[in-house]
Image: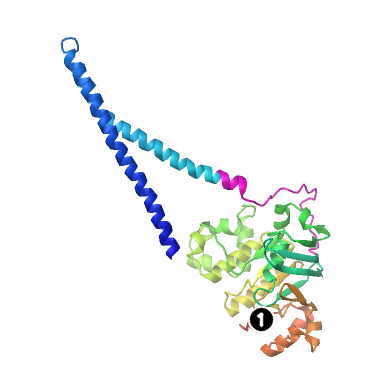
Amino acid sequence: MYRMKHLLDQNSCWLFMFQSAMRWLAVWLDMLVVIVVFVISVFMIGLAGYIDPAYAGMALTYALQMSGIFQFAVRMQAEFESKMISVERINYYIDNIEQEQLSACQSTLDACWLTEGAVSFKNVSLRYGEDKQLALKNVSFDVAGGEKIGIIGRTGSGKSSLVSALLRLYPICEGTICIDSHDVTLLDLRQLRCKIGVIPQDPVLFSGTLRFNVDPQGKCSDMQLWKAIETVQLKHVVEQKMGNGLDTRIEQGGRNFSVGERQLVCMARAFLQNVSIFLLDEATAHLDSATDHSVQRCFDDVAKKCTVFIIAHRLNSVMACDKILYLEDGQILEWGYRNDLLARSDSRFAQTVTALGLGVSKDDDDDDDENGDDDDDDVQ
């Protein structure tokens, strides 16, 4: 608070000095105009018999108007110079701040380069700055295409860092990450990210229409959009509460939608991307139990052949996953098939499941299609 007041005082001080300088300059300009009018008046008196009175009056009138013109011209010049400082700052930011090079890699892969969705981490380490500690430490695991992976761990264990590394949000320090045997560091960023669907915990909507938010690139037909909206159980909301359908206006940040409805819009957007890999960060945390189970079933149908990574803050969210990746302090604590970990008495995952009273239903053992009970306990 003190720093904010100090900065406000500084800004007010410079603004006061600028306005004071303008007022003082106006005084000197008025004095200059008075001198000019005086000279013209003397000149007119001296040439009284030679100059038409109409011309003399017109000359004095224009001379009196010079004060306002001078002040306006000087003020515009000062404002122009001050605004150009903003342009210089923008150019400085463009030239000197490091940015992602979306097309830095000259990849020769075609649009269908990702077919299976197999992901491999080999001795991957990641840090968020040269002076920061490692967020991931020598992480290695292999995921076959179509597998459903639950990523669990305490806050700060490296769950989100794993996703950041896969999406190349930050460069890795060591190791390699491959998707279908293609090193992600050699792929164009657009080429990589367009094949990965992300459903975040905090949904993001943009100011515009529902159509734009579900299909930002405008590649899908209305039938496809309605199918995606119906898949996520949002059709009745659009039809009943919003009379404009796909052209419904969405306010900045989706303020006219509830958190759960914004989450469903993000899920519909991900379904339309035709991706082979999904990243879910507790995507159904803001949904009620009935909608959660319904959307999970629909998601299982849509992503049946896709590789799915679920970052879980609640253990019940990963009870239907094929494999469990347990992270602690940026390292892999446990990794393996869910049932194998549950069968081990020394497994941290099994101990946590037992402590929370969660179980795996018979349907989960058979085909991994159903989620566990809707328990709100966090991973401890």
Residue 257 falls left or right of residue 40: right
Residue 9 falls left or right of residue 128: left
Magenta span contains residue 106: yes
| Closest to the observer, 204 or 133 | 133
- Residue 113: x, y in percent? 79, 55
Give me the residue at 75% from left, 61% from top: 173
The boundaries of the magenta stretch are 91-118
Q: Residue 264 sits in which quadrant? A: bottom right
Residue annotated with mark 1: 379
Furthest residue toward right: 181
Residue 257 falls left or right of residue 154: left
- Residue 220: x, y in percent? 64, 55
- Residue 201: x, y in percent? 60, 70
Tell me if residue 88 comes above or below residue 342 in the rendering. above
Here the colouring is: rainbow
Neighbourhood count class around disc 1 (C-alpha, 10 Å): few under 14, some 14–19, many 20 upward: some
Give me the residue at 76% from left, 52% from top: 111
Give me the residue at 71% from left, 48% from top: 103
Q: Residue 73 sits in which quadrant? A: top left
| Label 1 SS | loop
Query: In the rendered view of the protein, which quadrant contains the C terminus?
Result: bottom right
- Residue 79: x, y in percent? 40, 40
